[in-house]
């Protein structure tokens, strides 16, 4: 995929973060997974959300998914706290040029570099681009 097309995705991700009631940070996670690996993609989504939750220090969380409600798309997932259903992270899975990209965002914690590094270490991750309201890092 061309870098220009990816940069359009990164700019779209930046726009998702603004303007908001809370400061958000995020990542575009390019994976090696195609549609035949959806169970591994699902696990990667859970693991990436887990990395966010670990650094957010919010206690136990659960995943609310698109297939649980008609309010979400089928490839949309949200991490919420067990105590109060508070937002921790959200993720959309996008199939682009044969492989999936994850667009993941969360409330900014000051731990963004550590979160991105944890996500980079997960199975199936090809590349991670950090995204903030101010732009993206290549």
Image: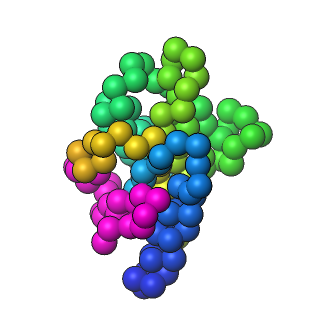
Q: Is residue 118 above or below residue 69?
A: below
In the rendered view, how is the structure colored? rainbow
Front position in the image: 81 or 47:
81
Left-right relation of 129 to 77 = left
Query: Which residue is painted at 42% across and 67% down in the image?
Result: 135
Q: Is residue 53 magenta?
A: no
Depth check: give the residue in front, 93 or 35: 93
Report the front residue among 124 and 27.
27
Magenta extent: 116-138
The verdict on residue 137 being magenta is: yes
Closest to the observer, 85 or 108: 108
The quadrant in which residue 67 appears is: top right
Residue 138 locus on image (x, y percent): 31, 72
* Image location of residue 78, percent across then percent down: 55, 37
The answer to whether residue 73 is above or below residue 88 is below
Quadrant location, the N terminus: bottom left
- Name the residue: 59% across, 32% down: 64
Does residue 98 sit above or below 35 in this rendering? Answer: below
């Amino acid at each position: 995929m061309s870098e220009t097309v990816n940069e359009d995705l990164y700019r779209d991700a930046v726009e998702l973060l603004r303007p908001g009631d809370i400061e958000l940070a995020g990542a575009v996670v390019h994976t090696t997974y195609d549609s035949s690996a959806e169970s591994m993609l699902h696990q990667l989504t859970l693991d990436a959300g887990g990395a966010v939750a670990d650094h957010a220090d919010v206690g136990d969380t659960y995943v609310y998914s698109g297939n649980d409600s008609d309010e979400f798309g089928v490839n949309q997932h949200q991490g919420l706290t067990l105590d109060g259903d508070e937002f921790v992270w959200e993720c959309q899975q996008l199939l682009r040029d044969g492989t999936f990209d994850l667009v993941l965002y969360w409330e900014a914690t000051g731990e963004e570099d550590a979160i991105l590094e944890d996500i980079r270490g997960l199975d199936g991750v090809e590349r991670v681009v950090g995204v903030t309201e101010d732009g993206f890092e290549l």
